[in-house]
């Protein structure tokens, strides 16, 4: 058998995937799409129509089927009737476009009749505060698995899947590069919860004694990985850094304000140093190895356009 036949994924070209949109209507306006686009990213009406509309159609079918299965299970168990959110995990490298994908899916899925309430939470809020990271010598490991308050994240997901009301999640500021003390977003039994973050598919070390250890991905009903060549992501990261140098970094309150006055060469050198010290090792050691744990892999080209879609076979 060929490698393609042995693969757990079915691979679609951009054109073949676009055909699966069927008659799904476009529910987003051009202005909304522009608002969702991340810094230095490509997101056009064509991208939404050809990639994200078919994806939202598939996910709507999956959610509907899962809701039916849940109701049947509740009836079998003679359990109380309450709503449990369908959880979608989105993972991938820094600068790969996870936030844009999450925002677009949130907007599209909220327009399907069976999922009117869709919430979005990022795992950045579950990073340890900078004071803790500095005390533990982990500031250079920020974004690595050990920099997250994993018990707090697992408790959050456990409460969501238990159907709890008004579950708080901490808030992270990319402006101050830290947790916002005293601020929370509240998740109150949505139809869908999208959880976006670097290491959402990471499992760590498996216990040898077979002890039950929960992983973040255990709570997912569906997972997506944003993929691209490592050198391509490096270019995206450096380009984004250069853009931020002339925008957000200029504010004196920004954690990265010290980089605002760098000239082009110094800024590129600084961005490359940060990439090589922190983001590249995390990508290679922790993030990219989880790629094939995802249900859907979106492979991007150099211009951020999604070129191929790999869907896990049922």
Image (cartoon, rainbow, N blue to C red):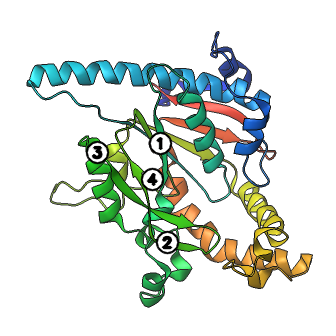
Between disc 3 and disc 2, the foreground one is: 3
- The answer to whether any part of residue 114 appears in the image is yes
Quickly name the residue at label 4.
200
Of label 1 and label 4, which has the lower sequence position? Answer: 1
At mark 4, the secondary structure is loop
Between disc 1 and disc 4, the foreground one is: 1
Which residue is pictured at 81% across the width and 67% down the height? 247
Q: In this figure, what is the number of numbered marks?
A: 4
Residue 162 spot, x, y in % from top left:
23, 43
Q: Residues within 10 Å of mark 4 (few under 14, many from 20)?
A: many
Between disc 4 and disc 3, the foreground one is: 3
Which dot marks residue 179? 2
What's the CA distance linking mark 3 and mark 2? 23 Å
Q: Residues within 10 Å of mark 1 (few under 14, many from 20)?
A: many
In the figure, 187 relative to 168: above or below? above
Which residue is pictured at 23% across the width and 56% down the height? 213
Of label 1 and label 2, which has the lower sequence position? Answer: 1
- Quarter of the image where one finds residue 261: bottom right
């Amino acid at each position: 058998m060929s490698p393609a036949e042995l693969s757990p994924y079915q691979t679609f070209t951009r054109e073949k995937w676009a055909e699966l949109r069927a008659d799904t209507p476009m529910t987003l306006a051009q202005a909304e799409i522009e608002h969702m686009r991340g810094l230095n990213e490509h997101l056009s009406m064509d991208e939404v129509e050809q990639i994200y509309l078919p994806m939202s159609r598939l996910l709507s079918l999956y959610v509907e089927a899962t809701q039916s299965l849940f109701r049947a299970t509740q009836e079998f168990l003679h359990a109380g009737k309450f709503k449990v959110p369908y959880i979608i995990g989105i993972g991938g490298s820094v600068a790969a476009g996870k936030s844009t994908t999450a925002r677009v899916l949130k907007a599209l899925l909220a327009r399907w009749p069976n999922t009117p309430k869709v919430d979005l939470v990022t795992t950045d809020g579950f990073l340890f505060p900078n004071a803790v990271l500095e005390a533990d010598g982990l500031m250079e490991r920020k974004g690595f698995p050990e920099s997250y308050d994993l018990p707090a994240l697992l408790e959050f997901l456990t409460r969501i899947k238990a159907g709890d009301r008004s579950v708080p999640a901490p808030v992270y500021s990319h402006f101050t590069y830290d947790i916002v003390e005293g601020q929370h977003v509240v998740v109150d039994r949505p139809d869908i919860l999208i959880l976006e973050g670097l290491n959402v598919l990471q499992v760590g070390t498996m216990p040898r004694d077979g002890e039950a250890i929960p992983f973040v991905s255990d709570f997912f009903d569906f997972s997506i990985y944003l993929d691209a060549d490592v050198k391509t992501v490096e270019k995206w990261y450096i380009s984004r850094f250069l853009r931020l140098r002339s925008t957000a970094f200029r504010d004196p309150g920004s954690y990265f304000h010290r980089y605002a006055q760098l000239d082009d060469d110094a800024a590129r050198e600084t961005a490359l140093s940060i990439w090589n010290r922190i983001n590249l090792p995390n990508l290679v050691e922790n993030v990219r190895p989880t790629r094939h744990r995802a249900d859907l892999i979106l492979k991007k080209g150099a211009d951020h356009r999604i070129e191929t879609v790999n869907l896990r076979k049922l």
